[in-house]
């Protein structure tokens, strides 16, 4: 029986945990299970390294640019390892490595701008910006490298040092990334720790950590906020989503079907801001279901390392079980699977790309984040009803509106309660834009200059014009 979740095992090199290939369900390597007691030393070193790192912005820029080059140069090693432990198709892993380098390069070019305050008084005050200290970065398993870079690139550019903990499901590519970056960054500036819980819990509550930058699920986000409360470290939380896509009456279904399908199914649906619910006008519902179902049936599912694979396996056994149980519950409640609806009869964590019609609106596959290759399509009678349904949730990450009249689509998008609303697209992000979920989907802002300032504190110098 393959091990379903990472477990501790003592070995000749100290304690380790197994890392599974989701395409087979079998362990293929292991990673060190670091003890929480080691964090005192790790955070202490990050604190020491901060002194030199924060002092020289020009040296930081040079180091981050060199780091970006090093990541690109290591792409041929990083991408297959990422696919092996995460499951995504190799081309998507290569794109993730490229985005990791791009984030380093983008933030290397950003610097905070001091701002004079002119309020008419005879005072020359100025807001300057100071780094915070060691930052704890904790990331999930769906985009291990690019989400890590989304945290450490702005934190490092701001002059902080970082202790990064990847998910125990995907520690290996991150460890390799750490060795690649070690050639470009001074010692102690970026440290990667791997291990099972309570390593993350102890990291976020460590008194030497000044900012906790977390991406993951809402329940863990709550635990992280509580864990960081005693030290009053700053928190930035990027949490789960349940994004709705609203199709308007004038939508050209065939024209948008590919884009809509891949906005839901890319990375096997394991994307925080994937389309997770579709609202279609009642008149178009069957056409939309069939257009998406056709694509689901045609998608090539297989191991990420096989050329031609478009959809890999789910990353891990608990995730597969969650997707399976939400789907089974929807089918038991009267939903119809226009495509898929079941796990695939083969080793590994494969689930058939699934399009569901006639789903009761209170079914968990609609109300919760199922985070897999399953898409419910719901019919609506008025746009007001669709907007109300899209907003009737504790999630608030993203949303989209699809139609031919762009002004009308934008007017509807403006009514969505979320951090980012797209028109005729979904989940397209620029490095330069802010990324901030609302409601239970997040706290704080990442991305663009906002992400840099999220890693800085204002420092005001107040000086009279005359002594
Ligand atoms: P998760 O919350 O289970 O785990 C995330 C990370 O937290 C992992 O590294 C895990 O080991 C660690 N962790 C677990 N318990 C902890 C604790 N008590 N204290 C500190 N760290 C702890 O999430 P997951 O299943 O790995 O990832 C999927 C979730 O991530 C989904 O909900 C998805 O929407 C979300 N996500 C959000 C974004 C975003 O930008 N908003 C991006 C990607 C994924």
Image: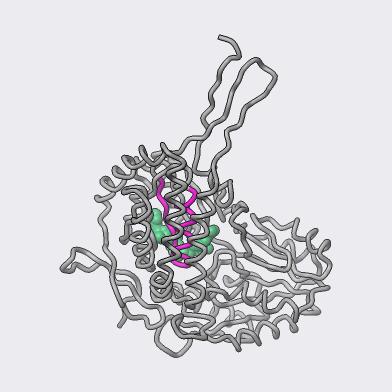
> Which quadrant of the figure shows ligand 1?
bottom left
Identify the residue shown where x is 52% and y is 86%.
308
The N terminus appears in which quarter of the rendering? Answer: bottom left
Residue 240 figure quarter: bottom right
Residue 121 figure quarter: top right
Identify the residue shown where x is 40% and y is 78%.
22
Q: Residue furthest top?
A: 467
> Horizontal placement of 152 versus 330: left or right?
left
In-front residue for pair 453/388: 453
Residue 438 appears in the picture as rendered: no
Where residue 54 appears, as percent x and y from the top left, is: 41, 39
- Which residue range is magenta in the image? 135-154
Q: Residue furthest bottom?
A: 345
Where residue 350 appears, as percent x and y from the top left, is: 47, 83
Identify the residue shown where x is 80% and y is 58%.
411
> Horizontal placement of 409 versus 367: left or right?
right
> Horizontal placement of 62 versus 352: left or right?
left
Residue 201 appears in the picture as rendered: yes
């Amino acid at each position: 029986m393959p091990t379903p979740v990472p477990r501790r095992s003592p070995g000749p090199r100290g304690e380790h945990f197994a890392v599974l290939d989701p395409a087979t369900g079998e362990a293929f390597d292991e990673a060190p299970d670091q003890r929480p007691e080691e964090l005192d030393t790790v955070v202490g070193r990050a604190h020491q390294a901060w002194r030199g790192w924060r002092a020289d912005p020009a040296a930081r820029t040079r180091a981050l640019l060199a780091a970006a080059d090093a990541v690109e140069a290591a792409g041929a090693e990083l991408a297959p390892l990422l696919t092996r432990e995460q499951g995504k198709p190799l081309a998507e892993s290569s794109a993730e490595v490229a985005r990791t380098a791009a984030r380093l390069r983008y933030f290397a070019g950003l610097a905070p701008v001091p701002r004079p305050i002119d309020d008419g008084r005879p005072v020359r005050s100025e807001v300057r910006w100071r780094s915070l200290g060691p930052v704890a970065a904790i990331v999930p398993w769906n985009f291990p490298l690019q989400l890590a870079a989304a945290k450490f690139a702005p934190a490092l550019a701001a002059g902080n040092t970082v202790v990064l903990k990847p998910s125990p499901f995907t520690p290996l590519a991150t460890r390799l990334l750490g060795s690649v970056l070690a050639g470009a960054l001074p010692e102690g500036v970026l440290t990667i720790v791997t291990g099972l819980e309570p390593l993350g819990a102890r990291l976020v509550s460590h008194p030497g950590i000044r900012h906790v930058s977390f991406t993951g699920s809402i329940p863990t986000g709550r635990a992280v906020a509580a864990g960081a409360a005693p030290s009053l470290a700053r928190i930035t939380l990027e949490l789960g989503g349940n994004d709705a896509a609203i199709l308007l009456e004038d939508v050209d279904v065939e024209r948008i079907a590919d884009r809509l399908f891949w906005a839901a199914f890319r990375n096997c649906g394991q994307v925080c801001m994937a389309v997770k619910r579709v609202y279609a006008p009642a008149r178009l519902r069957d056409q939309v279901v069939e257009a998406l179902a056709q694509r689901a049936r045609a998608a090539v599912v297989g191991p990420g390392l096989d050329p031609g694979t478009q959809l890999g396996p789910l990353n891990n056994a608990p995730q597969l079980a969650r997707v399976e149980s939400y789907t089974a519950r929807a089918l038991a409640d009267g939903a119809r699977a226009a495509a898929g609806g079941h796990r695939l009869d083969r080793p590994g964590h494969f689930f058939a790309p699934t399009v569901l019609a006639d789903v009761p609106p209170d079914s968990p596959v609609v109300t919760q984040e199922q985070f897999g290759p399953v898409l419910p399509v719901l019919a609506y009678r008025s746009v007001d009803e669709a907007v109300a349904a899209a907003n009737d949730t504790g999630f608030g990450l993203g949303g989209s509106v699809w139609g031919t009249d762009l002004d009308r689509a934008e007017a509807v998008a403006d009514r969505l309660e979320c951090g980012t609303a797209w028109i005729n697209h979904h989940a397209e992000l620029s490095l330069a834009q802010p990324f901030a979920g609302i409601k239970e989907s997040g706290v704080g802002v990442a991305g663009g200059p906002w992400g840099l300032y999220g890693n800085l504190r204002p420092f005001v110098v107040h000086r009279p014009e005359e002594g």
